[in-house]
Structures are given as C-alpha cells and as structure tokens.
C-alpha cells in the first residue's frame, strides 16, 4: 500500500514546509484502558516514522507541535511525564538526527521549561547545527498568541531604541520578529485525532496553508498517512485570493 501511495506523490510539487498538530495521544491510550502517558510514549514512535518519512521525501521543514503554552495547565503528573519523555527522546535521537543530516530547531517560550530540559535542548541544538537536510522544528511550550505578543514587545523596544521607524513596518518586519523568522510559512498543516481547530498554533504563518484533518490518533499516524495528506494537498488548487481561471492560466504559462 505504501509503495503505491509513494508513487502517486509528485516529487516536483512537494510542500517545502509541513506543520503537524500531533493530537490524540491521551484518547488513544484511554481507549486501550491505559494511562494517558502510555499514549504519549507511543506517540514518539510516530514522531520517528514521520521525521524519517519527511527526510526520505526531501521535505525541507517539518514543524511538530509537541507542547502548547496551555498544556502547562494539565495535571502535574502528565506535565512532568511529558517533559521527561520529550527531553529523553531528544537526547536519544541526536545520533539518529545526525546520521540522517537533520537539523533540530526549537520554538516556544523556553523560559517555562524545567532546568534539565534547557541543558539537553542546548546540547541537541548545538550537536545538529551543522546538518543541512531536513529542518525539524519542535514547538515546545509554544503558542501563537505568546509569539505575537513577544514580537510586538520586541518591535516596541526597537522602535524606542530608534532601530526601526514605525512608518516603515511591513509584513516582512513582523515576520523577522517571529520565532519562525528563519523558516518559510507551512504550505500544509495536518491535525490528527479528529479535532478541527488550530489550538493557538502558527496563527500568522498558516494564513494560506492547506489544512488537512484526519481522525487517525497521533500514535497510529505513520508514513502512509503522511503520504495520503501530501497526495490530498497536491490535488488542491491554491488560489491566494485570485480566480481559478487566473491560476490555470499561470500554470499553463509556467
Ligand atoms: C497530544 O495528545 C499531545 C499533547 C497535547 C502534548 P493529547 O494529550 O492532547 O491527547 P488527547 O487529545 O487528549 O487525546
Ligand atoms: C494541541 O493539542 C497542542 C499539541 C498537540 C501539542 P491540545 O490537545 O492541547 O488542544 P485542544 O486543547 O484539544 O485544543
Ligand atoms: Mg489533545
């Protein structure tokens, strides 16, 4: 099945940036009569498979929403378990990231993370900094509203310091103050688990992303599910406000 799906992907029309809301770990575990952390633990298998699948395809950027600012409000044992799992996984995966030429990035309010997480993250970022293949961006303690408020504060400070002229602020200026300033906007956003919402993820950057929702819970999501999402994406007409006729004419001219 996987081979057939893979053949249906047009390698010249790949999204260069895919963003994923990895949702449904808790329900997956509860449906099996297990603790929610069991679901998070199995979710790591999916992360591995999807990172590998993205790298094999030649996707340039993959952003994974792993922990939101709002997730800090979950019961403490779940938060602690998730933090340990995240840090442990990042630590263990560094050699595999290096073997596959994958560079790790982190976005989010990292001040909120426990001390032990800071050290591990710093090390993993440094150890993969030379890689030139897939850019794997982990959104940790991330929320879009936090990011936008942060950007506005920093723009304010730079205006005050005389570094920027408010009249000269453009979309490019704002983009430079976001935590994603080094990355292009995602063309495809996938959310698993059957929820149809954005949950404070990349609100600005997803302006023209194609959204793909699947009922599959994150711990069941594998490469073939990713291929299905990409095939669906490739069947869509992205119009960016223009008419279908204009887009078809532009495609014929290209
Ligand atoms: C996603 O799964 C992982 C995180 C939010 C950390 P959930 O833990 O949200 O699982 P559900 O949505 O409750 O099933
Ligand atoms: C979004 O999932 C955050 C992550 C996947 C990390 P949530 O499970 O926290 O989102 P809501 O609460 O269902 O909107
Ligand atoms: Mg959830």
Image (cartoon, rainbow, N blue to C red):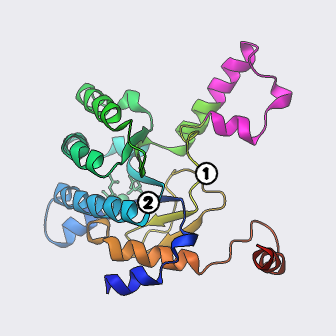
Q: Find residue 92 and report its horizontal and vertical position in percent.
A: 18, 44
In the image, is 182 to the left or to the right of 52? right
Q: Is residue 104 magenta?
A: no
Quadrant holding the C terminus: bottom right
The mark nearer the N terminus, 2 or 1, is 2
Ligand 3 image position (quadrant): bottom left
Most common SS among magenta residues? helix
Q: Is residue 169 magenta?
A: yes
Q: Which residue bears the numbered disc 1?
A: 205
Residue 84 higher or lower than 232, as above or below: above
Which class describes the residues within 10 Å of circle 2: few (<14), some (14-19), or many (20+)?
many
* Res. 22 in view: no
Which class describes the residues within 10 Å of circle 1: few (<14), some (14-19), or many (20+)?
some
Quadrant holding the N terminus: bottom left
What distance separates the C-alpha of mark 2 from that of mark 1?
13 Å
First to last magenta residue range: 152-177
Q: Residue at x 44, y 68 (%)?
A: 195
Q: 105 or 113: which is nearer to us?
A: 105
Q: Find residue 199 and report its horizontal and vertical position in percent.
A: 49, 55
Q: Find residue 224 and report its horizontal and vertical position in percent.
A: 35, 77
Q: Secondary structure at mark 1?
A: loop
Q: Which residue bears the numbered disc 2?
A: 20
* Res. 101 in view: yes
Residue lying furthest top: 161
Q: 115 or 24: which is nearer to us?
A: 115
Number of numbered discs on residues: 2
């Amino acid at each position: 099945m996987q081979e057939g799906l893979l053949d249906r992907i047009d390698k010249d029309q790949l999204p260069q940036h895919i963003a994923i809301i990895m949702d449904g770990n808790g329900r997956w575990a509860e449906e099996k009569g297990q603790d929610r952390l069991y679901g998070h633990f199995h979710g790591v298998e999916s992360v591995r498979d999807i990172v590998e699948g993205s790298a094999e395809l030649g996707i340039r950027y993959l952003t994974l929403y792993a922990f939101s600012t709002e997730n800090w409000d979950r019961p403490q044992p779940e938060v602690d378990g998730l933090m340990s799992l995240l840090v442990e996984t990042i630590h263990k995966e560094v050699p595999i990231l290096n073997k596959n030429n994958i560079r790790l990035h982190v976005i989010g309010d990292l001040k909120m993370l426990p001390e032990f997480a800071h050290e591990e993250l710093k090390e993993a970022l440094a150890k993969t900094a030379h890689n030139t293949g897939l850019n794997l961006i982990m959104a940790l303690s991330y929320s879009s509203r936090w990011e936008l408020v942060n950007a506005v504060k920093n723009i304010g400070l730079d205006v005050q310091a005389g570094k920027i002229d408010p009249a000269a602020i453009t979309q490019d200026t704002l983009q430079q103050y976001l935590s994603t300033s080094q990355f292009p906007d995602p063309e495809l956003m996938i959310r698993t688990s059957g929820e149809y919402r954005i949950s404070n993820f990349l609100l600005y950057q997803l302006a023209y992303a194609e959204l793909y929702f699947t009922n599959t819970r994150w711990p069941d999501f594998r490469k073939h599910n990713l291929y299905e999402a990409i095939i669906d994406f490739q069947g869509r007409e992205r119009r960016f406000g223009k008419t279908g006729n204009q887009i078809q004419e532009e495609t014929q001219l290209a």
